[in-house]
Amino acid sequence: MVLNRDQQLWAVALWVEKNHGEEGTAYIAQQIQRLSNEGDEAGIATWKTVAERFDQLSCQSSTN
């Protein structure tokens, strides 16, 4: 099974939620900071997109 880019990003967001729960936002921030220190702009953009999806998961969880 091959995932498209959007599915991959959702999968990462779900992984963060499963493995880090309420600390997921902090974990994502750490990844963005690490990539910033390395000068990896593409990685930063990827994790910012993951953060958006993670926030959407959090919103859905709190409304259900």
Image (cartoon, rainbow, N blue to C red):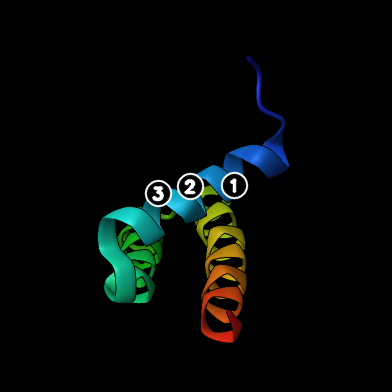
At a point 49% along the width and 55% down the height, the residue shown is: 13
Crowding near the residue tagged with mark 2, few <14, some 14–19, many ≥20 C-alpha atoms within 10 Å: some
The picture places residue 26, in percent across and down from the top left corner, at 31, 75
Q: Are marks 2 and 3 in contact (CB under 8 Å)?
A: yes
Q: CA distance from mark 2 to mark 3?
A: 5 Å
- Quarter of the view holding residue 3: top right
Left or right of 3, for residue 55: left
Q: Are marks 2 and 1 in contact (CB under 8 Å)?
A: yes
Helix, strand or loop for disc 1: helix
Crowding near the residue tagged with mark 3, few <14, some 14–19, many ≥20 C-alpha atoms within 10 Å: some
Residue 35 in sight: no
For residue 51, above or below residue 61? above
Q: State which quarter of the image contains the N terminus.
A: top right
Q: Amino acid at mark 3?
A: Trp
The residue mark sitting in front, 3 or 1, is: 3
**Number of disc labels:** 3
Which residue is disc 2 drawn over? 12
For residue 60, above or below residue 4? below
Quick one: label 3 or label 1, which is nearer the N terminus? 1
Which residue is disc 3 drawn over? 15
Residue 31 in sight: yes
Q: CA distance from mark 3 to mark 1?
A: 10 Å
Which mark is on residue 9?
1
At a point 62% along the width and 60% down the height, the residue shown is: 49
Helix, strand or loop for disc 2: helix
Q: State which quarter of the image contains the C terminus.
A: bottom right
Q: CA distance from mark 2 to mark 1?
A: 5 Å
At a point 48% along the width and 47% down the height, the residue shown is: 12
